[in-house]
Amino acid sequence: RFIESELGVPIKYISVGPSREQTIVL
């Protein structure tokens, strides 16, 4: 969960995406 902190993206945004990696890349 450190990745979301690095990007500054909320956990909800990553959780909503079907693929965590895909959401993070976008």
Image: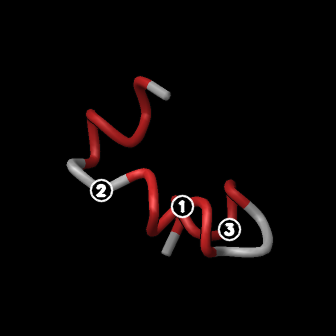
Furthest residue toward left = 8
Q: Nearer the viewer, mark 3 or mark 2?
A: 2
Q: Position of residue 2 (x, y in %)?
A: 41, 24
Between 12 and 24, which is closer to the camera in this rendering? 12
* Residue located at (68% from left, 57% from top): 20
Query: Which residue type does callout 1 highlight?
Result: Ile
Q: Relative to residue 6, is residue 26 drawn left or right?
A: right
Give SS at disc 2. loop
Other-residue count near label 1 (Cα within 10 Å), few / some / many at <14 / 14–19 / ≥20:
some
Give SS at disc 1. helix
* Residue located at (27% from left, 35% from top): 6
Q: Position of residue 1 (x, y in %)?
A: 49, 28
Q: CA distance from mark 3 to mark 2?
A: 13 Å
Q: Position of residue 18 (x, y in %)?
A: 78, 74
Q: Mark 3 or mark 2, which has the lower sequence index?
A: 2
Residue at numbered disc 2: 9
Between 22 and 18, which is closer to the camera in this rendering? 18
Residue at numbered disc 3: 22
Other-residue count near label 2 (Cα within 10 Å), few / some / many at <14 / 14–19 / ≥20:
few
Q: Relative to residue 2, is residue 21 drawn left or right?
A: right
Furthest residue toward front = 12
Furthest residue toward right = 18
Q: Nearer the viewer, mark 3 or mark 1?
A: 1
Q: CA distance from mark 3 to mark 1?
A: 9 Å
Q: Position of residue 4 (x, y in %)?
A: 38, 42
- As drawn, 15 above or below 6: below
Residue at numbered disc 1: 14
Query: Which residue type does callout 3 highlight?
Result: Gln
* Residue located at (32% from left, 55% from top): 10
